[in-house]
Amino acid sequence: MKFGGTSVADLDRIRHVAARVKRECDAGHQVAVVVSAMAGATNQLVKWCNDLDPLHDPREYDVVVASGEQVTTGLLAIALGKIGVKARSWQGWQVPVRTDAAHGKARVESIEGAALLADMAAGVVPVVAGFQGVAPDGRISTLGRGGSDLSAVALAAALKADRCDIYTDVDGVYTTDPRIVPRARKLERISYEEMLELASVGAKVLQTRSVELAMKYRVRVQVLSSFEDRPGTLVVDEDEIVEKLTVAGIAYSAEEAKITVRRVPDRPGVAAALFGPLAAANINVDMIVQNVGADGTTDMTFTVGRADLARTQEVLATLKDSLGYQSVLADPHVVKISAVGVGMRSHAGVAATMFRALAEKGINIQVISTSEIKVSVLVAAEYRELAVRALHTAFGLDGPEPPAKEEEE
Ligand code: ADP
Ligand code: ASP
Ligand code: MG
């Protein structure tokens, strides 16, 4: 059972989570729990690091941001003890959850399950800190934002769990973020592949790598509400899905920044000279376009995670003389909107539908990228809601108008 930030946001909610865990134990299940930090806690910790120095040492960043989860493991263990459930907290390094050395976005390399299994066999519920592990040099590492999902799936795989239930503040995976499209529909099931693609283009409900791992180890993941008692969404193999949609969902990511390198000499090797050093600095580049100018130069436009913007500019500055470009423009006010569906493999015209729907709303497309089951566009940040809604409608995903809150009783 994994509980996200809003599920452990205050003591009442932690008590509620404890009761939920107790119910599973009382039903005869052996349970391991993974918790996130209290809602907002990690943002605050990240901000402190950035305020002191945007180019901080990532190893110290990890020490700071991993602390939120330490608090909630202890609190939940106390809350469980209080209602008669034996429990103890585990930090990532204690388990241990071993990761690589990529501080701030480390990969899980192995999890030692023996101690936790011994706990469970002895009737003790292990409460494990999500998001954190230990790097090869023995220092604390973190798994990237939203990484508690990954902790949960990795743990489920290591413990050979029957299920990995991800409790959150929505009751499942929807056709798009239900917070910005009230007519989004809940999916009973979604394929690993579509969930992976949706997560990778911004649907925060599951962290990308957690889905990757679930797919690899065939972990049965369920996304469900920690506040309401109803079945959630199962992430399953494609052939277990009855209702096949051309587009299964729309996602957005407001966490990107657009960089344009103006007037780079247009000759073989410039792309390698530009993107090689960015890769070496562990900066992921996402969308790329190159406009060829008439005068032997070219403009290279690409996107990076906004958190990497300062570092990207720093790397580019070191390349100015060797590359001989004119200038660098950075625009953080962009949002990437994507349509995802395995049906795209067999249906033509998805991109055309998407571009038409955006054109009808007068939304200018800045960059486009596609993959086998996805089309993404970059637009100005102010169009986020309008664009997501327009596409949700254009692909026939709208459900019925939700009832007004008062009528729900
Ligand atoms: P937690 O703190 O429990 O990990 P997150 O905030 O990381 O929760 O993820 C849940 C949020 O994901 C929801 O509140 C919702 O706004 C957002 N979300 C984005 N896309 C989707 C989607 N397609 N289906 C459901 N939720 C989504
Ligand atoms: N607390 C971490 C974050 O906010 C990890 C998580 O919640 O999954 O990113
Ligand atoms: Mg999350």
Image (cartoon, grey):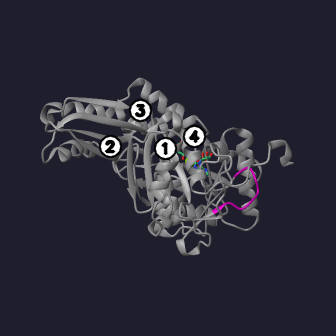
Mark 1 or mark 4: which comes first in sequence?
1
Span of residues in magenta: 226-233
Mark 3 or mark 1: which comes first in sequence?
3
Q: Residue 361 placed where, x, y %? A: 54, 41
Residue at mark 3: 332
Label 4 residue SS: helix
Mark 4 or mark 3: which comes first in sequence?
3
Magenta: predominant secondary structure element? Answer: loop
The structure residue drawn at horizontal position 69% and vertical position 45%, both measured from the top left corner, is 78
Label 2 residue SS: loop
Residue at mark 1: 359
Q: CA distance from mark 1 to mark 4?
A: 15 Å
Q: Residue 309 placed where, x, y %? A: 36, 34
Q: CA distance from mark 1 to mark 2?
A: 32 Å
Mark 1 or mark 2: which comes first in sequence?
2
Q: Farthest bottom residue?
A: 239
